[in-house]
Amino acid sequence: MSGIRLNKYIASSGLCSRRKADELIEDGCVNVNGKIVKELGYLVQAKDKVFVNQKLIRPAKHEYYRFYKPAGYITTREDDRGRKTIYDLLPETMFALKPVGRLDKDSTGLLILTNDGDLINELTHPSIKVPKVYFVTIDSKISRDELEQMANGIEIEPDKIAYADIQVLKMDNNGTEMQITLYQGMNRQIRKMFKHFGYEVKTLKRIQHATISLDGLKRGEFKPIKPLQIRELKNFLNRISNL
């Protein structure tokens, strides 16, 4: 019997990840042709009509973009405090796309935007150690001992151990420039790690997320990610998820 698994069908609409779709199905939120379906392996046929919370959904054509986030914008769709968001810089046709992870208001650099719920889940799930690379400057020289502590892990919040691979690019009396690779997704992780040692982060820019880089983008600019790059990204995620 041909068809597509119900959780994959829901995820392909851009509504949520496949994992979240499983929860919606189990919670009785999914209706196929007028009947609630709780079977995770249910196969959706071409003529079927699928409703989630009484709203008809259809598979969306997946879109993938790179975006160079400038400082001063928050990574969300709306803000009840009236702050500027990245969607103030994007055309209305991209409002259905979601950012993969976040950059705080003062940080800049690469954001991947997509409606592919499965890809978002793979890129952000804590069990998959996806590398994210940043260019960071701080306000002072840093010691070798502190670099080693950050590589081994430090407690930035109760029961939260953060670690980072750090390559010093330049160090003088004005500060330290570094390339930092993270494999975790903690909120404001880099800033909290340096604050732990009393340093202030002056600039923080994400330059790469997995296999996707910031190369060729100007501040505030967005470009589609090419199909070959998406295939390379998915192959990379498949390899590291099996490690």
Image (cartoon, rainbow, N blue to C red):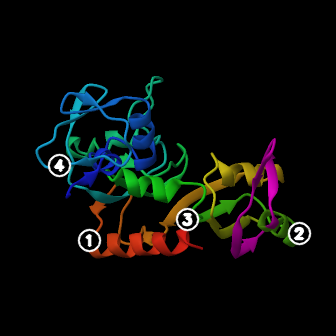
Dot 4: element: loop
Q: Which residues are magenta?
A: 152-172
Q: Which mark is residue 45?
A: 4
Q: Nearer the viewer, residue 44 or 176?
A: 44
**Which SS class for mark 3?**
loop
Q: Locate residue 185, reporting x and y percent.
A: 60, 53
- Are the residues tagged 4 and 2 within 8 Å (C-beta)? no
Whether residue 130 appears in this view of the structure is yes
Mark 1 residue crowding within 10 angstroms, few (<14) / some (14–19) / many (20+): few
Q: Which residue is mark 3?
A: 130
Check disc 4 and give the amino acid type. Answer: Gln
The CA span between labels 1 and 4 is 27 Å
Looking at the rendered structure, the secondary structure element under dot 1 is: helix
The residue under label 2 is 145
- Most frequent secondary structure within the magenta stretch: strand
Q: Position of residue 139 (x, y in %)?
A: 73, 57
Q: CA distance from mark 4 to mark 2?
A: 60 Å
Q: Nearer the viewer, mark 1 or mark 2?
A: 1
Question: Residue 224, position in %: x, y?
Answer: 26, 63
The residue lying toward the viewer, choosing from 176 and 17, is: 17
Is residue 52 shown above or below 109?
Answer: above
Dot 4 or dot 3: first in sequence order is: 4
**Distance (Cα) linking label 3 and label 1:** 20 Å
What residue is shown at x 55% (from left), y 45% (from top)? 104
Tell me if mark 2 has few (under 14), some (14-19) or many (20+) residues whose alpha carbon lies within 10 angstroms of its own.
few
In this view, the residue in front, 228 or 2, is: 2
